[in-house]
Image (tube, rainbow, N blue to C red):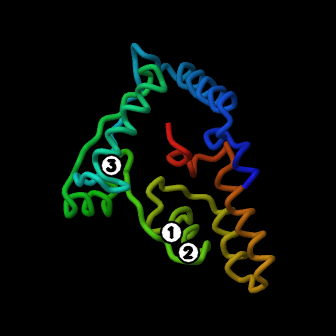
Amino acid sequence: ESEYDNLPGFRTDKAKREQDIKDALALLDQAGYNSNNPLKWEIMAWSVPNRVIGIDNIQLAAEMYKQVSGGVLDPTVKGLEWGTWKTAEANHEFQMISSAYSMGVDAHDALVKMYSSTGGRNFAQFKDPAFDAKLEVEKAEFDVEKRKELVKELVRYINDPSRIANAWTGTGP
């Protein structure tokens, strides 16, 4: 857990968090995004209020992105009813999605579903043959302690800032 406290976007120390935001805004500026030319995208969400992933919470998150970035980030929220949302989710017809699912009790299940090249919930379409090979090694290990270490290695791998696998996660705006 202490490793995550030092990753950009996961740090909770106020000064480090502010530095993360400053660094991110500098990268956006280098890419040509600023308050006069904001980065725009749409967050697809259920049109149901008062849930962990309800429309009201997603609208709040979108406003936080705008506020914290000084207008450099400009997301909008598209609320859909359940059936339409599920169809769009299955067809990967979204720019960013808000959802919450249980992946099961085994860390391997979540890693396969979210990050393997063929994972059914790999909405970022992250494809990395080295990661897939590491998953196969982890899956074949039956020693619990060794498996825990392999899972930690997999999580470190996908959270490496040089990879885009977790661009959509973190502790929020």
Q: Is residue 120 left or right of residue 158?
A: left
Res 129 label: none
Seen in the image, is 168 located left or right of residue 21? Answer: left
- Residue 104: image location, x then y, percent: 51, 76
In percent of width and height, residue 146 lies at 80, 76
Measured from the top left, where is residue 83 in percent x and y? 20, 64
User: Does the CB distance between marks 1 and 2 fall below 8 Å?
Assistant: yes
The quarter of the image holding the N terminus is bottom right
Give the residue at x 46% y 17%. Answer: 34
> What percent of the width, then of the height, locates residue 161?
67, 43
Q: From the image, tell me which residue sits under label 3.
A: 94
Q: Marks 1 and 2, Cα distance to the nearest angstrom?
A: 6 Å
Query: Which residue in the structure is indicated by mark 1?
Result: 113
* Residue drawn at x 35%, y 54% as measured from the top left: 53
N-terminal label among 3 and 2? 3
Q: Secondary structure at mark 1?
A: helix
Specify the label residue 109 is tagged with.
Answer: 2
Q: Amino acid at mark 3?
A: Phe
Q: Name the mark nearer the viewer: 3 or 2.
A: 2
Query: In the picture provided, is 150 more to the left or to the right than 32?
Result: right
10 Å neighbourhood of mark 3: few (<14), some, or many (≥20)? some
Q: Amino acid at mark 2?
A: Asp
Q: Quadrant of residue 123?
A: bottom left
Characterize the local packing of mark 2: few (<14), some (14-19) or many (20 or more) Cα atoms within 10 angstroms. few
Please name the amino acid that badge 1 sits on.
Lys
Between residue 158 and residue 146, name the one nearer to us: 146
Tell me which label, 3 or 1, sits earlier in the chain.
Answer: 3
Secondary element at tag 3:
loop
Between residues 17 and 35, which one lies in front from this camera angle? 17
Q: Residue at x 74, y 86 (%)?
A: 142
Disc 3 to disc 1, C-alpha distance? 18 Å
Name the quadrant containing residue 130: bottom right
